[in-house]
Image (cartoon, grey):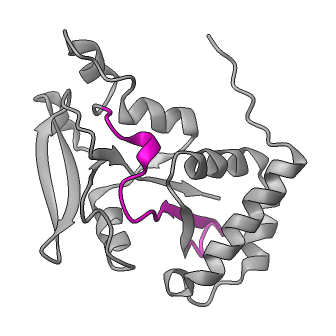
Amino acid sequence: MTVINRELSQEQREELLRTLKARFEKNMIRHEGLEWTNVQAKLEATPVKLWSLNEMEGTGGEPDVVGHDEETGEYIFYDCSAESPKGRRSVCFDRAALDARKNHKPENSAMDLAAEIGIDLLTEEQYRELQKLGNFDLKTSSWVQTPANIRKLGGALFCDRRYDTVFVYHNGADSYYAARGFRGSLRV
C-alpha cells in the first residue's frame, strides 16, 4: 500500500492560500457575510484539509467557500470550476463498478479518487445548491452520491445543467465518459 504524504510545504501552503483568497474575494456572492481571515485561520489550523484543498485545486476543481455551518463552525467548500474538474473525468462511479468492467477499464473511480483526495462527492441537494451560485456543467456532467437501492441495482446518478435547468440522470455505474467527472465537498 502506498503511503501518501498529506502535508504541503510552506511554499505550497502560501501559494494555495493566495489562490483561495483571490477566488474568495472575486466570488463574494458564494459566501456573503463571511470573512476571509476567519476561513484562513481555520485552514491554517487543519493542514490535512489544506492538503485536500490543494488536491481539489490540482485536479481542476477550483474549490471555494459556499457556506458556514453555525453549529460546528466548519466552512464548506465545493468545487466551483465552470465544468466538471478536468483531472477527475473519465471515471466510473465506484470500485465495484471498476472491478466489474471486463474491457476498457478507466484508470479510477469517482468514489476511490474522492477518498484519496479526502473529499465527498456532492449530493444531489448540494449540486442544486451549487447551481444557485452560478451556471456549472453546461458542457460536462458530474457523478453525485447515489442512494444505496439504486447502486445495488447497478446504477448511479449524475447531474448537469442544460436549458437553464438542472437535470439528474442515471447510468450504469460502470460507465465513464470524457465529459463526466465529479465535484466534491470538504468541510473545514
Q: Position of residue 161 (x, y in %)?
A: 21, 67
Most foreground residue, 152 or 23:
23
Residue at (20% x, 26% y) in the render: 174
* Any part of residue 145 in sight: no
Point out the stretch of residues depicted in magenta: 68-91
80 relative to 77 in the view: left or right: left
Q: Position of residue 12 (x, y in %)?
A: 80, 49
Location of residue 188 with respect to 175 vertically, above or below: below
Which image quarter is the C terminus in?
bottom right
Q: Position of residue 120 (x, y in %)?
A: 46, 46
- Residue 90 magenta: yes
Q: Quadrant of residue 116?
A: top right
Residue at (63% x, 65% y) in the render: 74
Location of residue 21 with respect to 118 vertically, above or below: below
Prevailing secondary structure of the magenta residues: loop
Q: Which residue is outermost to the right?
A: 10
